[in-house]
Image (cartoon, helix red, strand yellow):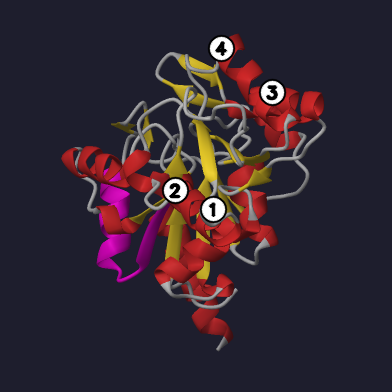
Amino acid sequence: MGSVRAVLIDIDGVLTVSWQPLPGTVEALREIRAAGLRVALVTNTTSRTRASIAHTLAGAGFPVSADDILTAPAVTAAHLAEHFPGARCVLLNSGDIAEDLGGVTLVGEDEGGESAPDVVVVGGAGPEFGYAALDRAFGYLQRGARLVAMHRNLYWRTDQGLRLDTGAFLAGLEKAARVEAEITGKPSAAFFAAALAHVGVGADEAVMVGDDIESDVLAAQRAGVTGVLVRTGKYLPQTHRDASGTPDHVIDSFADLPALLTDLRGSAQQQL
């Protein structure tokens, strides 16, 4: 690995749980900033806008702004603009993310008339993912709409335990409609390419820190980024054992990252 110049950081389960800071994470991020490393918070969170996330994190003491945050909705907007310009899109999501979907034409359920929308966009799961909504999406897909999903995470951790997420519903839609969703957030290669462009470094100069071994860590490693798995958030020993690959590094929590980065940068300098 070359000298580390940037750190890509998942938020939920790494820095916070239910938006409350995990022990030592604020101090660790401040230390990373003080070391001159570039930082991007890369998240599949679809319940809040970048501005809202930044406001909450800054209020908890994290040294971040909206410019430091890259979300699945923001990347989805860019994907739709590039691959489906002018498309009429129906959004199935829990939370108001319209602000981060600038340029996307969103139509309501009663605006489609007899013609299906061009794209069904699936965000994060919540109460909105009931039978009626999923059945409408199924109908649109049967009539030719394309399926774009911000992620396929199966669950996430809250202060009340693990909660079901989009992937559990998305698999059913794909199988029933005989289509395959285009994934725009993690673990897509395009998402990590956007993150690296955001911080302006090469893959071999970046570290990705996450609690999801598949979507965060192994996906980053496939993109050439060093992967660091934390044992917080949704981390489970069983998913670690059964994973499709091996993380480059495993640490107990994000609070341990500054020490790991010091070791990595020291090793790189000794090799020069």
Instruction: Report, in whole angstroms, how far the alpha carbon at label 4 lies from the one at label 2.
Output: 24 Å
Give, as a three-letter code, the residue at label 4.
Gly
| Residue on which disc 1 sits | 80
The mark lying in front, picked from 1 and 4, is 1
Height in image: 218 above or below 165? Answer: below
| Residue on which disc 4 sits | 130
Q: Determine crowd level at label 1: few under 14, some 14-19, many 20+ residues with C-alpha closer than 10 A.
A: many
Give, as a three-letter code, the residue at label 2.
Val
Circles 1 and 3, Cβ within 8 Å, touching? The answer is: no
| Residue on which disc 3 sits | 139
Pick the residue in front: 195 or 111: 111
**Residue under the point 78% across and 36% down:** 179
Instruction: Report, in whole angstroms, how far the alpha carbon at label 1 lies from the one at label 3.
Output: 21 Å
Height in image: 172 above or below 32? Answer: above
Left or right of residue 215: residue 68: left
Height in image: 264 above or below 81? Answer: below
Instruction: Report, in whole angstroms, how far the alpha carbon at label 1 lies from the one at label 4.
Output: 25 Å
Give the position of the C terminus as an image quadrant: bottom right
